[in-house]
Structure formats: C-alpha cells, structure tokens
Amino acid sequence: MANLFKNNWFLACAFSLVFVSCMRSGSQLVIDPENAGLVLPDGFGALKVADSTGTARHLVVNAKGDVFVKLQEPVDGKGIIMLSDADGDGRADAQTGFGNYGGTGIFIKDRFLYASSNSAVFRYALGEDGRVTHPLKPDTVVTGLIDRRQHNSKSIALDDAGHIYVNIGAYSNVCQEQDRAPGSPGIRPCPILDSAGGIWQFRADGIKQSYGDGERYATGLRNVVGLDWNQQAGALFVMQHGRDNLHDFYPDLVGAEAGIDLPAEAMYRLSPGADAGWPYSYYDQHQRKNIINPEFGGDGKKETEADVLDPVVAFPGHTAPNALLFYTGDMFPDRYKNGAFVALHGSWNRAPDQQGYLVAFVPFTNGEPSGDWEVFADGFAGVDTIPAPSDAKHRPCGLAQGPDGSLYISDSVNGTIYRIVYTNGH
C-alpha cells in the first residue's frame, strides 16, 4: 500500500502542469495556472503567496520562510505583516502583524529586523525561529528624519561592517524657488541638500541617532526607493528616481517624445562623498551625458562641468525603480547569480507611453554590470494599455530572496505577494 501511494504520488507530480518539485526536500510547492498572470522566462514559474495584504511596499523573508511585508499605511493598526506557510504549499495560511506605523523600508541582518517609518528606523530582535521576540518594544535606531510628504519613504540597506544606509528623498522636483512651477528658477546652492536628497549612513546598533550622529554618505540623489549592498563589489548601489516635467515646463528645449523618456532612471554605485548631480543636472541616456537642468541655465544639450557620477545602468525615464536586489541564491540558473533585479513600479509622468510595471534583470560579473538590462517578469498590470498608473491591476514594488533562492515580489495596489521559482521546465 505504501509503495502504491508513493508511485501514485510520483505520477501525479510528473504529469501535473503546475508541478514545481515534489521531491525537493519533500516540498508540495506548486505554481499557479498561467504563472499567476505573470510572463516569465522559460523554466520559471510563479504563485501567489498572499493577496490583499494592504499597501505593500518592501518585504523580506527570514531563514524559516516567513515573509515580512512593510505597508505604506497600517491595516488595523499593523504596519508590518508577517505571512507564514505551515503546510509548505507556498501559500500563506497565517497572517499576523505589528508595528503601528506606515513606511517602506524593511531589512533583516544579524538576527534583527529593521523597519522604517517616514521619519525613523526601528529594530526588532529575532528569536531562534526567525520571528520577532518583542513586537511592541522595538529599539529606535534613527529618529527625527525630515518628512515633508513628497519623496518621504525611508528605504534602507545594511552592509557587513555595522552600518545602515537610509534614503532621505528630496521634498522637491528640482529645487525651484516655487516647486513644480514652469519657469521658476532653481536655487543654488540648494538648501534641501543639507537634510535630504541623498543617502545617510548611521550605526546599525545605535539608539535614537539623528542627523548629528550619522553622516551624509552620498548627495545629489533626488529620491532613492531601491537600494542594496553588493557583496562582490563591497559597495552600495542605488536606483535614482529622475526629475519630472522636462517637456511640460520647457517644450522649446525638450520635445514631447524626448520628455516622455527623460531623464534616465539611473543605477549608481556609491562611495563616500559621491554626488549624482541633483538638482543641478540630470542624466540623458541617449546623449550619455549629465546635462544641466533648465532651471539652472541648461538648454537640453549643455553638459555639466561639475564632478558628478555617471550611472552604471540607465533605464527609461519615469519607470520608477522602487526596489533593487542582488541575487545570491542557488535556485536560479548561474547567469542570475550576483545579478541585479529591479522592480519598475511605473510613473504618472510617462503618459501616454506608459512603461515599467515589470521586474527587470541586469547581469553582473565581479560586482559590475556585464550586459544590458532585460525584462524578467512582466504582466503585473494585467492590461495591454496603461493610460495611467491607476489602470494597472498590480504594480511591483518590493523584492526579496527566500532561503531556497525563490524571488518574492510585492504589489502595492492590492497587496499581492508573488513568489517566483525556477522549475527547469517541469
């Protein structure tokens, strides 16, 4: 009887169209029909871990496979959702929550869970089971960060030397005397850069640190929502959200078609003291130059003479890169090892040629990009034409790697949590 059950179980797995790996560590994980609506490279499959969790932003997965999701707005007073899967089928069968604040950033490092509001970063101790031991009593690692609503998400990443990096986005489009007003000149020097528009570094074990305790690690970054530490390079990489309204404000300098695609959404490799140029310049991926912004005397062609960073990868403008993850798992094929996944959230300022709403991949070798970016996962929007972001059914926002090498993706519209696995064509 035991042999008959074993044989029938094997046959059921072998002939199932949704089979992933019945024999991998006894797993019963199966993918969803039609990959949960996603379009993936051959050999990959997808399933929905959970749905309707809230306004999901970034997420992380602990060593036991529990998923922690940071919500932009708390649901029933809970801004962090923990999803658990007791039976191993890949779907969450239990959901709990804690943390009565909204925000974006969340990260696990050295038996601690770090999570951010729009003005602070908190730290929770994790037990042997990978779960938070005292959810009502987090340490306040960083506090008092500026929050003026625009670009206020405090995304975070940690290195291996005890530092935490916090994005403090600029509360402005391009540091004008009158924000987002056509013809209003830029302010030089831009006062915003004293407390925002860059990445700040703090001690990961510090308590109630603020501006005077940390240091501005890099500047000239309008808004960074996606960032990650690259182990091979030993460096922080970030994704820049470029400025808006180039054509809208300066149609004589920047044509309508160019304005849709400019400036680039740029990936930078940072080092201490780096300057990416905002608000004085932007990166034009077609001219491959840092161009002076019109608010500061630019004409759409004049290159800046300032010593500013060039990006290591340039994406189309207004695609809103909201997450960056360097893949270190062993599940995916070798070409993905140490490469970068980027969640392109989509932006209001790209109409009528909406792009994004996908997860891209950039191959890396020895800590540097080694090829062009490519589409990895598409179909989140659920429609062929996207007149505006509100027409998309799903928008990828956060990325995380599971202990088995799965890739998790959060959706900010309905709070859907996707899991992508490599099936090797099975």
Image (cartoon, grey):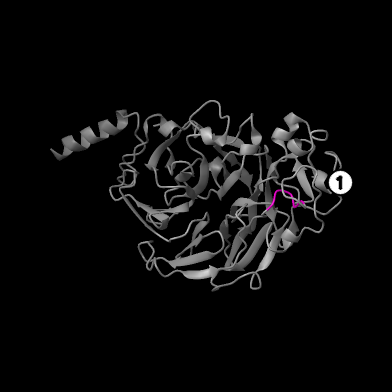
Which portion, as a residue range, is magenta?
172-176
* Residue at which label 1 appears: 297
Amino acid beneath label 1: Gly
Q: In the shown orientation, is residue 131 left or right of residue 221?
A: left
Residue 329 belongs to the span the image colors magenta? no
Q: x, y (%) of residue 359?
A: 55, 39
Residue at image coords 55%, 64%: 120
Q: Quadrant of residue 272?
A: bottom right
Give the answer, above or below, for where 78 lies relative to 368. below
Give the answer, above or below, for where 16 lies relative to 365. above
* Depth order, front residue of 296/376: 296
Q: In the shown orientation, is residue 35 left or right of residue 220?
A: left
Main SS, magenta residues: loop
Q: Is residue 66 visible?
A: no
Q: Quadrant of residue 300?
A: top right
Residue at image coords 29%, 33%: 13
* Depth order, front residue of 426/173: 173
Q: x, y (%) of residue 422?
A: 44, 38
Residue furthest left as drawn: 1
Q: Quadrant of the N terminus?
A: top left
